[in-house]
Amino acid sequence: MRLKINFEKCTGCRACELACSAKHYQKYSPELSRIRIIKFEDKGTDIPVACKQCVNAPCVTNCPVGALYKDPVTMATLLKKELCIGCGVCVEVCPFSAAALDEDGFSMICDLCGGSPECVAVCPVQAIEYQDIAETEQKKRIVTAERHSDNVLKKWRIK
């Protein structure tokens, strides 16, 4: 499972950031959110950035102390706080810039709220969805196949 974000729907309300920080830190603080809204004022665009739950997650494989691991049930990246040394390697190696360190220097990576993401629950425009990766990939395959099928039919003038 992973978060699927529809950038075009995001209004920049930041409800997701506040819900995330409240869930994990009992504070309303965008700096403590595991999802971040990047605002482009000049373009009038808001882009949510969140962990993509990489299968071979660089944050997990590069953590020098093994503080990050994949949950066997949700496959979310989780932190063994007692092992984290706050080195920031996870932040440096994240290909999506979705990792950060909290105010105490601990790794902040989306843990999917144990399988019920708060950001999904509070998004007023459903810009964030919690989806099965396999289901999402199958939908992409069908759309691609239909597109190619249409092109083949046009090429050979088959109706």
Image (cartoon, rainbow, N blue to C red):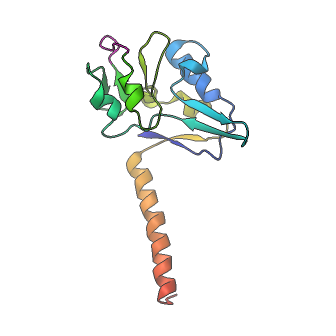
Left or right, 51 with reference to 72: right
Q: In front: 61, or 20?
A: 61
| Residue 26 place in picture, x, y as percent | 55, 12
- Location of the N terminus (image quadrant): top left
Q: In front: 80, or 98?
A: 98
Number of marks drawn: 0
Q: Is residue 84 magenta?
A: yes
Instruction: Work out whether 142 lies above or below 119.
Output: below
- Residue 71 visible, this angle: no
Left or right, 99 with reference to 43: left
Q: Is residue 72 magenta?
A: no
Instruction: Work out whether 1 lies above or below 32.
Output: below
| Residue 68 place in picture, x, y as percent | 32, 24
Q: In front: 93, or 126?
A: 93
Which residue corresponds to the image point at 37% horizontal and 26% vertical from the top-left? Answer: 90
Which residue corresponds to the image point at 26% horizontal and 21% vertical from the top-left? Answer: 66
Instruction: Work out whether 71 lies above or below 2.
Output: above
Which residue corresponds to the image point at 54% horizontal and 35% vertical from the top-left? Answer: 49
Residue range in magenta is 80-86
Which residue corresponds to the image point at 50% horizontal and 30% vertical from the top-left? Answer: 117
| Residue 34 place in picture, x, y as percent | 50, 26
- Residue 153 visible, this angle: yes
Residue 92, quarter of the rendered image: top left
Instruction: Work out whether 95 lies above or below 36.
Output: below
| Residue 46 place in picture, x, y as percent | 66, 38
Main secondary structure of the magenta stretch: loop
Q: Residue furthest bottom?
A: 157
